[in-house]
């Protein structure tokens, strides 16, 4: 009945519920586990069970479930005991109308307790998460009191303080100890303003540590600032990347702006996106003018069709090289450029055309001039050669005709026929004179020139002509004197000889240009009578290469027009003939010394200004050259040179033995009973060369002196590895008297 009354009151209180009634310990425990009640209503006294025992069991099994005591009578002491034991409330059966409010209050307290527990758990979890973030973050977190005292800091902050200060900071330290430079931001944060700053600090090992430091105010519930939160993160990697990017951009900008080539970029429609300084200087348009222009606007009308063609190909994805265009500068002057053109795509579509050009206007002009000069020289040499040949033949025709006419009597009718022959020959001579006049029709402008200045003036052009695989060395002697010649023609000589030397060195090599003074006497002139060398004072210009050299057969024809050893299409055969003609027009002469595998040397002798065709001064004859009685062995493969040397030495009283090469010289030394006092040997010879001969003689007769001679200069011989430095040397060509003086000096020096 009591249970029914309770349920009745619950229904009256409009509390929806499902109930279970138990009156034993076993059923109570079972329903606790199976029914899982939200509320327990218990009588204080039950025949087979009692409320206090149920309360104790409920507190053990379901401590969060409200437990209400419902009793018929209870005193105050019993009620207090129930509440202390854990009862939520107690009700008197005489006043069950209060059951609804009591249950709602109990459930409300449960909900409040659960909410509080959840809130506390959430707070604990939040604090744990924040502490985990605080302690394990890669960023430094520091909590600072208003007086600047560090209240808390994480492990990252401790690590960075160790790196910066050499010691770790702990709670209680001052923020100024960590980052003194950040004090201003700390004060601003105390004033309520959050501040960010980037600081570059020096590590204990001297390296840079870049930090991005944020300081924000910490406020309480009332909005008052109670501290500062300092957050710092390492941005050193970013700063290094930014610095590397800036340096890379600076290098690129420097290369871009200071490049001698003309660099530009346009959109696919040809509008300029950017150009470098060289482009501005070459085209002569300002940035504003180019900004409103297209590339086609600066293309010469003759090149526009070509430009449109290469642009179409570049936009189609082709990279074009050696594109030659004629552009028009702001002043209207056309310039010729050569370069590369390519397209930059984005998402499969062209977005930018990039061009790198080089101004070749001057090069094209020089090339055109050279081609014209070669054509004129070729025509002139051909016409001159024909004229000389015809004139020589006509000289014989006319001369022998006159001899024939003198043999006839005055009344001999055949005299008239001979006179017709003479008249025809004379007319032919007139034609040849006209041809010779054609060969001289190019107007010359001779002037006093310093030959060293001419060489220095074309040095850059010669180096460009040689290319990167070949070296150019200048050996210009001081005080060589002036010559009278056409500067342009002399530059043509240097260029032709340099290009000829380059072609003789397919892979790599060295070209040496040297100048000096030369005094040539009558003996030398007689030895070169075929060339026609007037004796006197000369300026020597020589060009030496380390190329393949030439055989005697090739040397005999190198100055012939149209003669060349190059494949068809790679040489005209006019280069050296042009050089020969220019040198002859300048009253000079040219001589070549070369051997297969040993390179070549071209020597040009030009009369010194004021000494043109001057004979040697007859007065003040040189001191008499003392002869000798010693025995000298001359080793030379050239018959003419060997004969000249032997004859000159014999005329001075020496006993002379001859050998054509080193092996024959060794045989002569072994067979001949004469004691040889000196050996004169050419450097480059067949069978056995001069250096090898010297090595053999040094082992056999170390006391025997050797004088080496060569058509190469002494420095060239040493650089080519043909002689050791300091070896006695006689330069070819030489005079018999000069060779005799050198021999006498060596023989006398041996006895000192």
Image (cartoon, rainbow, N blue to C red):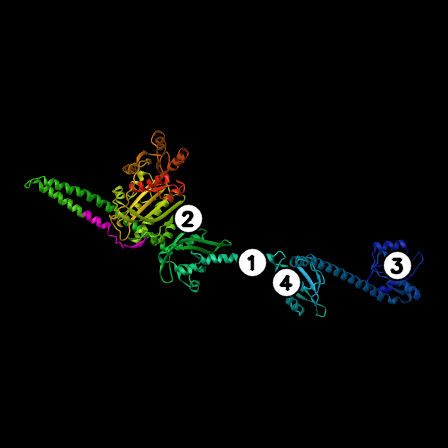
Of the 4 image quadrants, the one containing the C terminus is top left
Residue shown at 11% from the left, 43% from the top: 419
**In the displayed image of the protein, which residue is found farthest to the front?**
752
Q: Is residue 155 magenta?
A: no
The region drawn magenta spans 431-450
Q: Is residue 441 magenta?
A: yes
Residue shown at 37% from the left, 47% from the top: 512
Of the 4 image quadrants, the one containing the N terminus is bottom right
Q: Nearer the viewer, residue 286 or 737?
A: 737
Q: In which image quadrant can residue 531 be found?
A: top left
Say which label, 2 or 4, has the lower sequence index.
4
Q: CA distance from mark 4 to mark 1?
A: 18 Å
Say which label, 3 or 1, has the lower sequence index.
3
User: In the rendered image, which residue does mark 4 sit on?
Assistant: 213
Q: CA distance from mark 2 to mark 4?
A: 55 Å
User: In the rendered image, which residue does mark 1 sit on?
Assistant: 242
Horizontal side of 575 relative to 507 (left or right) equals left
Select label 2 or label 1 by which is in front. 2
User: In the rendered image, which residue does mark 3 sit on?
Assistant: 55
Asked if labels 1 and 2 touch by Cβ distance under 8 angstroms, the answer is no
User: In the rendered image, which residue does mark 2 sit on?
Assistant: 468
Say which label, 3 or 2, has the lower sequence index.
3
Considering the numbered disc 4 on the image, is that residue within a helix, a strand or a loop?
Answer: strand
């Amino acid at each position: 009945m009591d249970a029914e009354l309770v349920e009745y009151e619950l229904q009256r209180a409009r509390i929806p519920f499902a109930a279970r009634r138990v009156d034993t310990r076993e059923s109570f425990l079972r329903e606790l586990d199976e029914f899982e009640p939200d509320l327990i209503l218990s009588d204080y006294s039950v025949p087979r069970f009692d409320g206090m025992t149920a309360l104790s069991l409920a507190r053990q099994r379901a401590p969060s479930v409200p437990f209400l005591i419902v009793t018929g009578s209870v005193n105050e002491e019993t009620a207090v005991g129930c509440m202390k034991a854990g009862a939520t409330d107690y009700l008197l059966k005489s006043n069950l109308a209060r059951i609804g409010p009591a249950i709602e209050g109990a459930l409300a307290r449960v909900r409040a307790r659960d909410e509080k527990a959840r809130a506390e758990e959430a707070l604990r979890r939040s604090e744990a998460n924040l502490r985990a973030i605080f302690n394990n973050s890669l960023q430094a977190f520091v909590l600072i009191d208003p007086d600047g005292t560090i209240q808390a800091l994480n492990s990252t902050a401790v690590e960075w303080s160790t790196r910066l200060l050499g010691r770790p900071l702990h709670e209680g330290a001052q923020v100024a100890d960590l980052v003194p430079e950040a004090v201003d931001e700390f004060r601003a944060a105390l004033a309520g303003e959050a501040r960010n700053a980037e600081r570059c600090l020096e590590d204990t090992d001297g390296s840079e540590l870049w930090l991005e430091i944020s300081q924000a105010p910490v406020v309480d519930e009332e909005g008052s600032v109670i501290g500062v939160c300092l957050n710092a993160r390492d941005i050193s990697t970013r700063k290094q990347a930014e610095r590397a990017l800036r340096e890379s951009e600076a290098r690129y900008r420097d290369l871009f702006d200071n490049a001698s080539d003309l660099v530009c970029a346009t959109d696919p429609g040809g509008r300029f996106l950017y150009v470098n300084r060289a482009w501005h200087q070459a085209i002569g348009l300002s940035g504003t003018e180019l900004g409103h222009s297209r590339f086609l606007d600066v293309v010469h009308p003759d090149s526009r069709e070509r430009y449109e063609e290469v642009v179409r190909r570049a936009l189609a994805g082709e990279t074009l090289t050696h594109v030659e265009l004629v552009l028009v500068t702001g002043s209207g002057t056309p310039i010729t450029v050569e370069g590369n053109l390519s397209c930059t795509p984005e998402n499969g579509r062209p977005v930018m055309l990039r061009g790198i050009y080089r101004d070749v206007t001057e090069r094209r002009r020089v090339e055109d001039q050279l081609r014209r000069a070669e054509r004129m020289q070729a025509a002139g040499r051909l016409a001159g050669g024909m004229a000389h040949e015809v004139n020589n033949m006509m000289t014989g025709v006319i001369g022998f005709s006159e001899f024939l006419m003198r043999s006839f009597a005055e009344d001999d009718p055949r005299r008239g026929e001979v006179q017709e022959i003479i008249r025809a020959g004379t007319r032919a001579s007139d034609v040849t004179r006209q041809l010779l006049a054609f060969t001289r029709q190019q107007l010359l402008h001779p002037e006093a020139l310093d030959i060293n200045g001419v060489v220095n003036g074309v040095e850059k052009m010669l180096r460009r002509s040689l290319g990167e695989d070949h070296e150019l060395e200048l050996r210009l002697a001081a005080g060589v004197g002036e010559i009278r010649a056409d500067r342009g023609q002399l530059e043509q000589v240097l260029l032709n000889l340099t290009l000829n030397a380059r072609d003789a060195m397919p892979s790599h090599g060295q070209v040496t240009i040297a100048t000096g003074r030369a005094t040539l006497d009558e003996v030398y002139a007689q030895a070169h009578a075929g060339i026609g060398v007037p004796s006197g004072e000369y300026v020597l210009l020589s060009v030496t290469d380390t190329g393949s050299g030439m055989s005697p057969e090739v040397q005999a024809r190198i100055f012939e027009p149209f003669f060349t050893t190059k494949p068809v299409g790679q040489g005209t055969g006019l280069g050296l003939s042009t050089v020969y003609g220019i040198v002859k027009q300048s009253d000079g002469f040219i001589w070549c010394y070369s051997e297969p595998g040993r390179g070549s040397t071209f020597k040009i002798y030009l009369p010194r200004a004021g000494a043109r065709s001057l004979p040697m001064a007859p007065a003040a004859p040189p001191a008499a050259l003392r002869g000798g009685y010693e025995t000298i062995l001359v080793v030379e493969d050239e018959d003419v040179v060997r004969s000249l040397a032997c004859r000159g030495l014999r005329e001075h009283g020496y006993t002379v033995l001859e050998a054509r090469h080193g092996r024959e010289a060794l045989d002569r030394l072994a067979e001949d009973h004469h004691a040889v006092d000196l050996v004169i040997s050419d450097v480059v010879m067949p069978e056995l060369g001069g250096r090898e001969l010297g090595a053999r003689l040094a082992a056999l007769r170390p006391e025997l002196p050797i004088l080496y001679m060569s058509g190469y200069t002494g420095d060239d011989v040493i650089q080519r590895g043909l002689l050791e430095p300091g070896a006695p040397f006689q330069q070819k060509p030489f005079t018999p008297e000069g060779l005799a003086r050198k021999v006498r000096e060596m023989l006398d020096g041996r006895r000192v």
